Amino acid sequence: MTPPDETPGLSVGVIAVGDEILEGRILDVHSQHVSEEMRRWGASVRWHFSLGDSPGELVDALKLFQGKVDWILVTGGLGPTADDRTREEIAAALNLDLVENGEAWREIHQRLSSRGFEPTENNRKQAFFPRGASILSNPNGSAPGFAVKTAEGTRIFALPGVPHEFRAMFEEHVVGELKSHGGLSRLQGEILDFVGVPESRLDEWVSSKVPSSQLYQICVRGWGQIEVRLPDGLSLQSEAAEMFGARLIGTGGLPVEEHLVEKAMEAGLSLTTAESCTGGMISSRLVNVAGSSRVFPCSWVCYSNSSKTRELGVDPALIEEHGAVSQPVVEQMALRAREKSGADLAISVSGVAGPGGGTDLKPVGTVWLALATENQILSHCYQLHGDRERIRSLTANLALLGLLAAVRGLEVPGWSEKRS
């Protein structure tokens, strides 16, 4: 087994604890985050495992997996309630006593009191740890974590399941441990990000470029966005740009909105949106990107016909004659949004997302998009397929792709109609 202090080749397992995960009430986002971060350091996540809160389940899992990986990260089960059993389970699996740490209890007591809560006796259990464990401070909550090494040499990290507590502690204690052993170890190859290219076409193209002895991965990030992970040492960025044009949105395994905000900031261009069928999905994704306020001043969600007229000034006669899902209406939505916001670029969308509302002329999946720039308006009609979620999500990706192409000075893929 690779010693834990040798970061390259470090093997990691992740155990997410909680009935709420197994029952589907919440998603296990921590395992995804751990995998993404560990990959950056050249570590290998060998498995993700989800467990309920029943006594003995974590004990059995740890006895099965300890010694088979270098590190095990356990998330959840560090709260004060009876079903929070991670401390007891880890101690039992390692045949260790649970011992109280007085300093930890004082910090828990002080944190709760400072927030106006009177600590209860069950909070005290959060100050108990397996004998010999290192205590991991929690700057955002009342539950400290801990790290302990098994007899087989596996190091177990126990972190809270509350997302903002987990993220901060993972960065400080787990990533901090990796940083203490030196710089980043970039073991993965180039990652190419695409929007609007079928997975089968990408696979056919990549397979013709990668030697048969080497492995590559194609990962679907969401409706319409795909990333290609190439073998270490191989770059196909220039060839992909020539082959796929604006549909190659960048590198690094980033969502299209992150590429867009980065490029817009570099270009000094501002963006706005006018949304109907997507109901704010596009603008929501933009504001999820740190720093987006520098390029994204405002947006509109105009779902009804009357709101398109009232908020954006769309001519009601156009809606009456052509319908809300039409080229004249989306073009006027984009034009008015750009004028009202003062932004350099405006994208608008209007479509039939389903499951109802379709007609013979405009079936479910009919979506019009328009892009207004300083000198022209471009528009395009897509016929998308799938359920409501897929149609709306794919529309958002196509709109973001249109904005990104305009920011980069590239032709918007498939949008050939241009009018000054």
Image: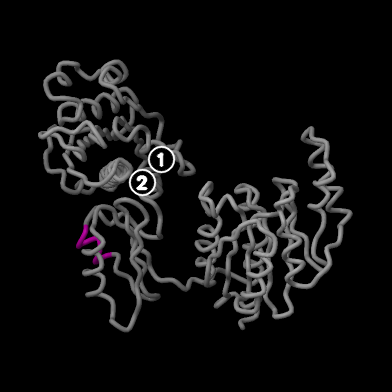
Do we see residue 171 in this rendering? Answer: no
Instruction: Note whether 216 is above or below 116 in the view shown.
Output: below
**Looking at the picture, how far across and down is residue 401, in whole percent?**
28, 46
Given residues 388 and 342, the one toward you in this image is 388
Q: Residue 260 shows which numbered tag?
A: 2
Disc 2 element: helix
Mark 1 is surrounded, within 10 Å at the Cα level, by few (under 14), some (14 to 19) or many (20 or more) other residues, namely many
Give left or right: position of 305 versus 296: left
Q: Position of residue 152 (x, y in %)?
A: 70, 80
Q: Position of residue 227 (x, y in %)?
A: 34, 61
Residue 251 is left or right of residue 158, and the answer is left
Pick whichever, 236 or 333, lies toward us: 333
Q: Is residue 67 magenta?
A: no
Q: Residue at x 28, y 81 (%)?
A: 211
Please name the residue shown 69% across and 64% down the image. 56
Q: Which residue is mark 1?
A: 286
Gap between marks 2 and 1 measured at Cα: 8 Å
Q: Crowdedness of circle 2 by 10 Å Cα count: few (<14), some, many (20+)? A: many
**Quadrant housing the N terminus:** bottom right
- Residue 369 drawn above or below residue 78: above
Determine the main secondary structure of the stretch shown in magenta.
helix
Q: Residue at x 12, y 43 (%)?
A: 416
Q: Secondary structure at mark 1?
A: helix
The amino acid type of the residue labelled 1 equals Leu
